[in-house]
Image (cartoon, grey):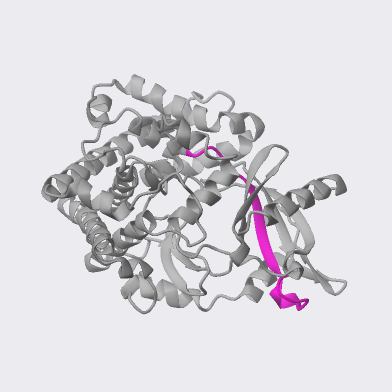
């Protein structure tokens, strides 16, 4: 089997465009039927640039990965927990379950079991696209990717050599520059500030604010949500459960996503009491319909596929396997036979944005941190992760993948990402042409 780069380069523009349309239809066809306006909005956002197209088309990436060959994969390294949609804007800050502000990978909706190089290639390609968008030279773009990858490899090797380093996290104490600034800004956020933005106080109690997107629900739906919520509580690890007071539902609303990643996806917002009856301690949770993970379409492993009850379960199990000290509110349930992901709407999440990162030294510093953060999710999981799919030392397996051939591994990853970024820029134009000319039925 040859590299997918060679396969794509042999295809005509018409064949490639048909492949793109089919990949997006397979992933979003049901939402095109049920939520055409939302998907139309998603596609228009994707049409803004090659990078936004790439962000919204993980399904296309994995359709390509399904026909790729990779000499650095073996039985273990092709079967680790991966993020699934690792691009340069899926990083940010949060307050972890240990009460520490950290910079890490976020958004685990596409997380799955697959090849570690899929995460690396997707991340490096995104850096190439950002570098191109910033009008950097080919040499500078390759330096960005190389810095990130070498940082990843060095951190994995550190984990493998010294188990004590697995407590590693990127915090305000060991970062500088842009990352330190983001972490410090995050500390200024407050729960009451979030509540003031999203809720109002009526009749001496707090309620979720309604608007054109946030809608009230009827009594029948409320009853179904409450039953789903009861099932969700059973999925919180025993060591992270709070008192019954924390979980008393005060209000529920519904909305449908309009972003690039969540377009058309139904989400219930649930307001619960929190640790006391004080109004400033109320907690906002989201209960979101989980979608099929894009990497799952490239993984032909029935043991993996059958391991999960549904995609809500898959998302939570994956996130706990990838994220040290995951939130005590993270859990899953089902609603009308659809798997649901339940998570806190936290005030402490501050996403990495690249608009004001333009000096080469700043860019390279951030790229280095992204490599470290990626190594962390691949090698370190939550103490409450009880998964049994991946039961070997990941850091040791990863080091073995490039042992004795580091230069070859580096070159292969960088060459692939460089070429795939160029293909993505061409794919972007093919996508825009297909969308403009009605080649997506129903839009």
* Camera-nearest residue between 75 and 33: 75
Whether residue 94 sits left or right of residue 271 in the image: it is left
Query: Is residue 405 placed above or below 432 in the rendered structure?
Result: below
Q: Nearer the viewer, residue 67 or 114?
A: 114
Work out whether residue 146 can be spotted: yes
Residue 236 point in image, percent of width and height: 63, 58
Q: Residue at x 17, y 46 (%)?
A: 409
Left or right of residue 233, residue 97 in this image: left
**Rendered location of residue 10, percent (x, y):** 24, 22
The N terminus, quarter of image: top left
Viewer can see residue 352: no
Residue beneath the point at 52% across and 50% down? 317
In the image, residue 283 lies in the stretch drawn in magenta: yes
- Identify which residue is drawn at 24% across, 54% down: 149
What span is colored magenta in the figure?
A: 274-293
Residue 51 is covered by the magenta coloring: no
Pick the residue in front: 176 or 295. Answer: 295
Left or right: residue 359 compared with residue 408:
right
Quadrant showing the C terminus: top right
Work out whether residue 387 or residue 250 is closer to the camera in this orientation and state it.
Answer: 387
Location of residue 18 in the rendering, given as x and y in whole percent from the top left corner: 41, 22
Give the percent coordinates (x, y) of residue 325: 49, 65
- Picture mark count: 0
User: Vertical placement of 287 versus 31: above or below?
Assistant: below
């Amino acid at each position: 089997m040859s590299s997918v780069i060679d396969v794509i380069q042999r295809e005509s523009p018409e064949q490639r465009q048909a492949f793109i349309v089919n990949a997006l239809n397979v992933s979003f066809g049901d939402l095109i039927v049920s939520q055409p306006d939302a998907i139309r909005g998603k596609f228009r956002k994707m049409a803004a640039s090659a990078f936004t197209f790439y962000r919204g088309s993980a399904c296309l990436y994995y359709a390509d990965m399904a026909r790729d060959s990779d000499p650095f994969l073996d039985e273990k390294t092709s079967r680790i927990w991966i993020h699934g949609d690792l691009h340069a804007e899926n990083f940010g800050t949060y307050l972890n379950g240990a009460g520490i502000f950290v910079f890490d990978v976020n958004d685990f909706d596409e997380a799955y079991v697959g090849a570690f190089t899929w995460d690396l290639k997707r991340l490096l390609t995104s850096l190439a696209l950002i570098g191109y968008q910033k009008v950097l030279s080919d040499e500078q773009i390759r330096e960005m990717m190389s810095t990130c990858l070498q940082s990843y490899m060095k951190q994995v090797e550190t984990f493998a050599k010294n188990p004590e380093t697995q407590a590693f996290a990127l915090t305000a104490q060991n970062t500088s520059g842009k990352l330190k600034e983001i972490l410090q800004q995050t500390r200024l956020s407050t729960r009451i500030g979030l509540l003031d933005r999203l809720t109002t106080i009526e009749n001496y109690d707090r309620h979720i604010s309604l608007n054109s997107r946030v809608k009230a629900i009827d009594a029948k739906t409320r009853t179904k949500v409450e039953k789903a919520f009861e099932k969700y509580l059973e999925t919180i690890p025993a060591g992270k459960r709070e008192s019954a007071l924390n979980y008393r539902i005060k209000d529920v609303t519904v909305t449908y996503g309009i972003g690039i990643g969540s377009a058309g996806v139904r989400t219930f917002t649930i307001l619960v009491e929190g640790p006391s009856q004080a109004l400033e301690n109320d907690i906002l949770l989201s209960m979101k319909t989980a979608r099929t993970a894009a990497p799952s379409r490239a993984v032909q492993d029935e043991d993996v596929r059958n391991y999960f009850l549904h995609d809500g379960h898959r998302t939570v199990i994956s996130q706990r396997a990838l994220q040290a000290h995951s939130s005590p509110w993270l859990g899953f349930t089902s609603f009308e036979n659809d798997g649901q992901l339940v998570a806190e709407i936290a005030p402490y999440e501050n996403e990495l944005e690249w608009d004001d990162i333009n000096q080469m030294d700043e860019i390279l510093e951030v790229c280095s941190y992204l490599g470290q953060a990626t190594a962390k999710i691949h090698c370190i999981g939550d103490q409450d992760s009880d998964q049994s799919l991946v039961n070997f030392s990941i850091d040791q397996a990863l080091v073995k993948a490039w042992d004795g051939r580091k230069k070859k591994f580096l070159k292969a990853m960088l060459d692939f990402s460089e070429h795939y970024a160029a293909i993505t820029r061409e794919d972007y134009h093919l996508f825009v042409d297909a969308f403009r000319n009605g080649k997506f039925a129903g839009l």
